[in-house]
Amino acid sequence: MTGPPSAENGRRSTRHLRALAAAVLAVAALVAAANAGPARASDDNRPAQQAVAPR
């Protein structure tokens, strides 16, 4: 039988398209998070104060 495909066989369902969109969004979020890098330190060049405990 040749002819136009039915709606079931010819098109992807909305459920599959939503799952694909969610997967693409998740991958994009992971790539963006991986490229974010660590936070920068402050530009203050002074050494940190160390507390000395009394004896």
Image: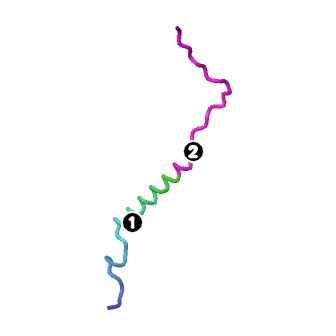
45 or 51: nearer the eye?
51
Per the image, the residue denoted by label 2 is 37
* Residue that sits furthest to the top in the current view: 55
In percent of the image, x 61 and y 23: which residue is there?
A: 48
Main secondary structure of the magenta stretch = loop
- Residue 10 position within the rendered picture, expressed as x and y whole percent measured from the top left: 36, 78
**4 lies above or below 15:** below
The magenta segment is 32-55
User: Which image quadrant is residue 23 in?
Assistant: bottom left
In percent of the image, x 51 and y 48: which residue is there?
A: 33
Q: Residues within 10 Å of mark 2 (few under 14, many from 20)?
A: few
Per the image, the residue denoted by label 1 is 17
As shown in the figure, which amino acid type bears the numbered disc 1? Answer: Leu
**51 lies above or below 21:** above
Q: CA distance from mark 2 to mark 1?
A: 32 Å
48 or 17: nearer the eye?
48
- Residue 35 position within the rendered picture, expressed as x and y whole percent measured from the top left: 56, 50
Q: In the image, is 47 to the left or to the right of 54?
A: right
Give whichever of discs 2 and 1 has the lower sequence position: 1
As shown in the figure, which amino acid type bears the numbered disc 2? Answer: Gly
Q: Residues within 10 Å of mark 1 (few under 14, many from 20)?
A: few
User: Which image quadrant is residue 4 in?
Assistant: bottom left
- Which numbered circle lies on residue 54? none
* Residue that sits furthest to the right in the current view: 45
In percent of the image, x 37 and y 72: which residue is there?
A: 12
- Name the quadrant of the N terminus: bottom left
7 or 19: nearer the eye?
19
- The kind of secondary structure element at disc 1 is helix
- The kind of secondary structure element at disc 2 is loop
